[in-house]
């Protein structure tokens, strides 16, 4: 996996979501939890062995298949991870979690067209699915289309599901300012002229008020 924050911004996020709400058939806790613990300890090969053994007993578990693909990706076995997730998609083509993880595999392989298509499939199933819009924005940013990237980052921010979307928006804004492309503020001379005009008007209004109060005082004295 590329770790270059410039060429592949946000890529350390890949597969951070794979084990969140995997969906599919429920697992008997032991195999799932043992594999999860092994993966958390940085032992993906052992986690893979545990999950593959469990899969033999539950061949239609998309939850297991997602975990297996995650371990395979950690081990650099991207072709195997892709095949595993394609199998999961065949089992549950309308499961957004399954399609999202296939999209992550494509993104990890730098198959941007395939990844983009899969992320859009995720949104077609569930238009607020967490991080899908973020990764679409990321792909557009990697391709240099900052306007499209911002559109999807904003969409993700509105979903409230991905702090990295905020970070990418700020980075793009900072970059435009550094390049002199950010929207310009008002001209300083115009600000000064406006301020002077406001002060003059305030002075005139105050003078008029004093004049009117003086006239009322004179009229009151005449009536007495």
Image (tube, rainbow, N blue to C red):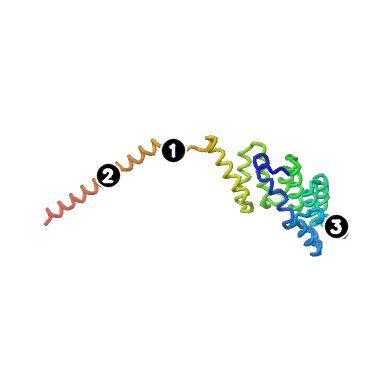
Q: How far is the residue under mark 1 from the one under mark 3?
A: 64 Å
- Residues at badges 1 and 2 in contact (C-beta under 8 Å)? no
Q: Position of residue 125 (x, y in %)?
A: 72, 51
Q: Position of residue 55 (x, y in %)?
A: 85, 57
Tell me the element at label 3. Answer: helix
Q: How far is the residue under mark 1 from the one under mark 2?
A: 25 Å
Residue occupying image coordinates x 76% and y 60%? 37
Residue that badge 3 annotates:
55
The residue lying toward the viewer, choosing from 136 and 46, is 46
The residue lying toward the viewer, choosing from 60 and 33, is 33
Residue that badge 1 annotates:
186
Q: Position of residue 119 (x, y in %)?
A: 71, 46
Q: How many marks?
A: 3
Tell me the element at label 2. Answer: helix
Q: Which is nearer the N-term, disc 2 or disc 3?
A: 3
Residue 53, image quadrant? bottom right
Residue that badge 2 annotates:
203
In the displayed structure image, the side of residue 200 where residue 100 appears, left or right: right
Q: Name the mark nearer the viewer: 2 or 3.
A: 3
């Amino acid at each position: 996996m590329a770790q270059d924050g410039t060429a592949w911004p946000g890529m350390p996020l890949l597969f951070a979501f794979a084990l969140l709400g995997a969906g599919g058939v429920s697992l008997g806790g032991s195999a799932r939890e043992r594999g999860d613990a092994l993966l958390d300890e940085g032992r993906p090969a052992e986690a893979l062995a545990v999950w593959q053994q469990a899969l033999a007993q539950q061949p239609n578990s998309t939850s297991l298949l997602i975990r297996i693909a995650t371990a395979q990706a950690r081990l650099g076995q991207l072709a195997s991870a892709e095949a595993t997730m394609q199998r999961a998609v065949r089992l549950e083509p309308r499961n957004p979690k399954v399609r999202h993880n296939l999209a992550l595999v494509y993104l990890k392989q730098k198959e941007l067209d395939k990844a983009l298509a899969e992320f859009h499939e995720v949104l077609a199933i569930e238009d607020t699915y967490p991080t899908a819009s973020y990764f679409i924005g990321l792909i557009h940013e990697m391709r240099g289309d900052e306007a499209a990237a911002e559109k999807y980052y904003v969409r993700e921010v509105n979903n409230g599901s991905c702090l990295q979307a905020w970070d990418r928006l700020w980075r793009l804004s900072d970059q435009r300012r550094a390049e002199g492309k950010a929207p310009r503020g008002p001209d300083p001379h115009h600000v000064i002229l406006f301020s002077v005009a406001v002060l003059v008007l305030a002075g005139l209004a105050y003078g008029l008020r004093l004049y009117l109060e003086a006239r009322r005082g004179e009229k009151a004295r005449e009536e007495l």
